[in-house]
C-alpha cells in the first residue's frame, strides 16, 4: 500500500454559513477512508483565526445543528507559501521547524463569503497547495448572484428576471418592481448561500424590511421574480472536458420556501425526492443545462445547480453552488449516491481531481525567463 495522503479539512469561517460548514466537515471527516487518508482538521473561527483541532473533539454539540460550534481549544496555524504545500503550526515552531508535516491536499469545505467566494482559493493557489473545488474565478462568479446571472444570460441560458441593488443606490419603488417582476418577489443578499437573509415579499409593508435584512449580510442585494414551479437540483462532478451530471432530485419545502431552517435545522423541513418523478426528457435537459452552467462559469471539481420546473415544462436556472453542503441531509452527496457513487467514493474522486489539476497547472510557464 502506498503512502497515505494527508488531507487538510478546512472548515468554519467568518460567514453566516459557519455552522453549516461545521456539519459538512464532520461528515467528510467521518467518511474519509483511513486506509488512504490521514485527516488534518483546521477550523476557522468566526474571528478568522485558523485553529488546528484534535480529531477526538473538534466540534462541540456536534449532534445538534442548532448548537454545534467549533472547539476553541486548538493551536493557531497558518499556510506557509514556498511551493511545498506546507501548513505549519505557528505556536509549535521550534528552531524554525514546523511541528506539522506537509499536507498533500486541502478540502476547503467553507460555505459563503470568506471561503466559497475565491478568497481562500486564491490563498491556497499562492501557497501552492492542491485543493478541492472551483478556482478563484468560478468561486467568485458563482458566489455573486448578480455576476452569475449576467454570465448565464450572456451564455444564452434560461434565467429568471432580476434586479441588483447596491447599498449606495436608491431602492426602486415597490409599484415599479411589481410591474417589472410581478408579486410576490424575492429579496436576497447577492453574496450569500443557504437562503440566509432571504425574504419572500408579498406586500408593500414587507419590502423595506426585506431590504434591511438582506443588506445586513451584503452590500449588494438581488431582487428576483417569483417563479412558480417545482424545485429541482442536479449535482455536477468532474473537470472539463470530462464533466458528468447526477440524477435529478426534487425538493418539496414544508416551510414558506426552502429556507435555512428547512435545509439544515429541521430534518422534516423539506421532502427530498431522489430521483425526481419527472419525464426522462426533462431530467436529460436539466443534466445538460447543469453541465452548461458549470462550463459557462469555468467551474471545476464539483457544483450543484438548482432549477425551477414550470408547469409548461420549461426549466429556469435559479443558481449554482460551487461548494455545496456536505451535511447528512445535503442534496449534493445524496444525488450522487442515487447515481451510484457512494459518499466515500465521491470524496476519493474530488481529491483525485484536485491533485490532477494541481499537477496540470504546475506544468504551465509562470515566467518568460528561466
Image (cartoon, rainbow, N blue to C red):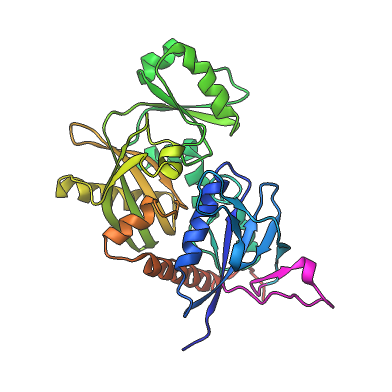
Along the line of sight, which residue is nearer the eye, 362 or 183? 183
| Percent of width and height locating residue 251 | 31, 42
| Percent of width and height locating residue 338 | 27, 58
Residue 45 lies, with reference to residue 188, above or below; the image says: below
Q: Which residues fall within the magenta stretch?
A: 83-104
Question: Would you say residue 91 sits in the magenta stretch?
Answer: yes
- State which quarter of the image contains the C terminus: bottom right
Count the marks: how many? 0
| Percent of width and height locating residue 331 | 36, 51
Q: Tell me what residue is drawn at x 44 percent, y 47 percent.
A: 321
Q: Tell me what residue is drawn at x 50 percent, y 47 percent.
A: 65
Q: Which secondary structure type mostly characterizes the magenta part of the structure?
A: loop
| Percent of width and height locating residue 45 | 66, 51
Question: Would you say residue 78 sits in the magenta stretch?
Answer: no
Q: Can residue 56 be seen in this view?
A: yes
In the current view of this chain or complex, which residue is farthest to the right?
Answer: 95
Residue 56 lies, with reference to residue 108, above or below; the image says: below
Q: In this view, does 91 lie to the left or right of 308?
A: right
Q: Tell me what residue is drawn at x 32 percent, y 59 percent.
A: 336
Q: Is residue 253 left or right of residue 72?
A: left
Along the line of sight, which residue is nearer the eye, 263 or 175? 263
Amino acid at each position: 500500500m502506498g503512502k497515505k495522503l494527508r488531507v487538510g479539512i478546512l472548515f468554519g469561517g467568518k460567514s453566516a454559513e459557519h455552522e453549516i460548514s461545521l456539519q459538512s466537515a464532520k461528515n467528510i471527516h467521518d467518511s474519509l477512508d483511513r486506509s488512504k487518508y490521514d485527516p488534518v482538521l483546521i477550523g476557522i473561527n468566526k474571528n478568522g483565526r485558523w485553529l488546528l483541532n484534535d480529531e477526538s473533539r473538534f466540534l462541540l454539540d456536534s449532534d445538534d445543528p442548532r448548537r454545534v460550534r467549533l472547539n476553541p481549544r486548538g493551536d493557531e496555524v497558518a499556510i506557509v507559501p514556498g511551493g511545498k504545500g506546507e501548513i505549519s503550526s505557528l505556536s509549535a515552531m521550534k528552531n524554525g521547524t514546523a511541528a506539522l508535516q506537509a499536507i498533500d491536499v486541502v478540502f476547503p469545505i467553507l460555505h459563503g463569503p470568506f471561503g466559497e467566494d475565491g478568497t481562500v482559493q486564491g490563498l491556497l493557489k499562492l501557497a501552492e497547495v492542491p485543493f478541492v473545488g472551483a478556482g478563484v474565478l468560478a468561486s467568485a462568479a458563482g458566489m455573486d448572484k448578480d455576476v452569475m446571472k449576467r454570465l448565464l444570460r450572456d451564455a444564452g441560458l434560461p434565467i429568471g428576471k432580476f434586479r441588483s441593488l447596491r447599498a449606495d443606490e436608491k431602492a426602486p419603488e415597490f409599484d415599479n418592481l411589481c410591474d417589472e417582476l410581478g408579486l410576490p418577489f424575492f429579496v436576497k443578499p447577492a453574496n450569500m448561500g443557504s437562503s440566509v437573509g432571504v425574504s419572500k415579499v408579498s406586500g408593500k409593508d414587507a419590502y423595506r424590511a426585506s431590504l434591511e435584512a438582506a443588506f445586513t449580510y451584503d452590500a449588494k442585494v438581488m431582487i428576483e421574480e417569483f417563479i412558480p414551479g417545482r424545485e429541482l437540483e442536479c449535482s455536477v462532478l468532474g473537470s472539463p472536458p470530462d464533466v458528468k451530471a447526477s440524477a435529478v432530485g426534487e425538493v418539496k419545502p414544508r416551510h414558506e420556501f426552502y429556507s435555512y431552517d428547512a435545509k439544515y435545522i429541521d430534518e422534516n423541513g423539506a421532502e427530498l425526492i431522489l430521483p425526481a418523478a419527472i419525464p426522462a426528457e426533462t431530467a436529460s435537459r436539466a443534466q445538460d443545462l447543469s453541465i452548461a452552467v458549470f462550463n459557462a462559469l469555468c467551474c471545476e471539481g464539483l457544483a450543484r445547480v438548482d432549477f425551477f420546473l414550470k408547469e409548461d415544462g420549461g426549466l429556469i436556472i435559479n443558481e449554482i453552488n460551487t461548494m455545496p453542503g456536505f451535511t447528512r441531509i445535503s442534496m449534493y452527496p445524496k444525488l450522487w449516491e442515487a447515481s451510484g457513487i457512494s459518499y466515500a467514493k465521491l470524496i476519493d474522486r474530488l481529491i483525485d481531481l484536485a491533485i490532477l489539476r494541481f499537477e496540470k497547472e504546475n506544468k504551465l510557464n509562470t515566467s518568460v525567463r528561466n
